[in-house]
Image: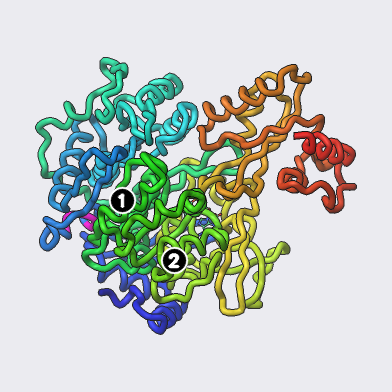
Amino acid sequence: MSDYIASSLAQYNELYKRSVDSPEAFWGSFAREEFVWRTSWDNVLSYDLHKPHIEWFTGGKLNITENCIDRHLAEKAHETAILFEPNNPDEEHLAISYKELSEHVNRTANMLKSIGVNKGDRVCIYMPMIPELAYAVLACARIGAIHSVVFAGFSAQSLADRINDASCAFVLTADGGYRGSKITALKDIVDEALQKCDCVTRVVVNRRTGSKIAMHDGLDVWWHEAIEGQSTVCAPEVMDAEDVLFILYTSGSTGKPKGMVHTCGGYMVYANYTFRSVFQYQPGDVYWCTADIGWITGHSYIVYGPLSAGATTLMFEGIPSYPNADRFWQVVEKHSVNIFYTAPTAIRSLALCDINLVNKCDLTSLKTLGTVGEPINEEAWEWYNDHIGKNNCPIVDTWWQTETGGIMISPLSGITETIPTFATLPLPGIQPVLMDEAGNEIAELEAEGRLCIGHPWPGMARTIYGDHQRFKDTYYSSFPGKYFTGDGAKRDSNGNYRITGRVDDIVIVSGHNLGTAEIENAINQHPLVSESAVVGYPHAIKGNAICAFVNLTVPSKDAEKLTNEIMNLVATIVGPIAKPERIQVCSALPKTRSGKIMRRILRKIAAGERSDFGDISTLLNPECVADIVAQTATM
Ligand code: WT7
């Protein structure tokens, strides 16, 4: 029990007020009381959001793995830290105790040292959802190396871009990854990526699928060979609170992904605080977040948040539909999961399946349900509530971002009154504000505007790796002195927030954050394409789908062939998750007089609107709108 984790609405209100009145006292006391520090800090917070310059717990020294592992060994050595549920339900699951986790992480840390990884080095981790992925992440943190996990669904090109951006000298991967009935050829993809990377000196390959792969002398080493004989003892590197813990890439509005930088002290404090506050985790609970560790959700709510809280965190290797669409519910039953956290897109697709697949499973262990990644529509919310929660489990609709490090606006389970489609109230310590288009803060409670955060919080990203100017331009320039989220939101008369979606050039498809520019760059590489414009449009299951409007240099003779080629190009360059749902050839793209493509109009056309595009007279080529409508109608 902590005085800083609300356990009633009255306490939430009291904590919220305290956190706003004196943020430094609030975070300082929580950080001091709840974590192991080697040295205390000089300053809780120093900042200037105009630069922006942000430091938390300056001068404090710690190691996050000491907080996630070592400190639990006295009382929880034999309790389960990680429950691993494999892709194949016939393969036995693993219950990894805190003591075993400690040994695995230390051996992995020593393995990294043995291949030359030093404090501050960047290590790219491109692995399937197996326990070794969690060990690798924690092993980096243990020795002060900076991990950059790249989701194992990304293409060779995307992987190469991310390896190069952070000049990673080391890559950790596997021979393959199970995904339902398929195997992802991870090592082959690494080999292809490394054709374009000069910085990598060592690749460590974990054997998972037994797939036939090429091992290159002097570069590749097998994990099981490199870890052989390594000691289970590895002293944690003492880190400054503001040393970099990890880099994690997220899409941006140019084609180049942004390497968000999170630091040791603030991130640890915030991941732990939000995990405990939102999910109200109690000792003995089994907690399951279905995300992949390749996303921030997995970093904060599979690894660092739960483990720092001494929780049991379930790690699932598979997919919701394998071997059948009841897999999630089978796993809940099998492990008596108490807290279940997933994405709206998964809920929407599972809601379409035979309801008997749900009803035949025993879901009575569930206490709390969560969602993250995109707005959840009312229908999906109600289905989740009725059929999974049996009207008995609070749903926490958690709004946050890769950039925020942890949950920002969300109900606290069992405490905050939930409202379908609302992320509800900010956590104590978080000060959201709504801004109008003129850049003024909206004072009225009931309002709609652009969502900003007015005061620093410990989990916030500190910079974009190697590009502080871009960090400033993207997040701190639209509304000087405030962090701009890129989202729009509505606020009701009780102060509850409802996130309405992105107001920039990012589209969220099945919970994946995709930059339209990155996809356009890929499409433009097709020899027949002169220009393209990618927009999102509402999709029943994915939330949004991608429609690509393309303008050709010469007419295509075979439309189907062209469509397939463009789809494959996007899949290879960006990754399969970015494949457009629709490709629409058009004779011209609507442009402003300054040459900027008017996506607003294309978004409307993609969403099925055929008229009412507002004032298009300011366009350079207004006549093309009618043409595009006509061409689209024939689809
Ligand atoms: C964007 C951030 C946060 C981890 C997963 C995604 C959207 C996220 C919600 C929610 C409405 C949401 C926002 C945000 N988003 N959670 N509960 N309700 N929208 O992280 O890839 O950095 O994407 O996801 O648009 O800006 P991400």
| Residue type, numbered disc 2 | Ile
In the picture of the structure, the residue carrying the numbered disc 2 is 395
For the C terminus, give its image quadrant: top right
Q: Residue 331 shows which numbered tag?
A: 1
Q: Residue at (77%, 46%) from the top-left corner?
A: 601
For the N terminus, give its image quadrant: bottom left
Who comes first in sequence, dot 2 or dot 1?
1
Where does residue 631 sit, x and y in percent of width and height? 80, 34
Image side of residue 114 versus residue 166, left or right: left
Q: Residue 91 shows which numbered tag?
A: none
Secondary structure at numbered mark 1: helix
| Residue type, numbered disc 1 | Val
Task: Tell me if residue 451 comes above or below residue 598 in the rendering.
Answer: below
Magenta span:
67-71
Q: Which image quadrant for residue 493?
A: bottom right
Q: Residue at (48%, 49%) from the top-left corner?
A: 353
Task: Tell me if residue 408 comes above or below residue 570 in the rendering.
Answer: below
Q: Residue at (56%, 45%) from the top-left corner?
A: 509
Q: Nearer the viewer, residue 332 or 471?
A: 332
Q: Is residue 358 magenta?
A: no
Q: Residue at (26%, 53%) from the top-left corner?
A: 334
The kind of secondary structure the magenta stretch mainly shows is helix
Q: Nearer the viewer, mark 2 or mark 1?
A: 1
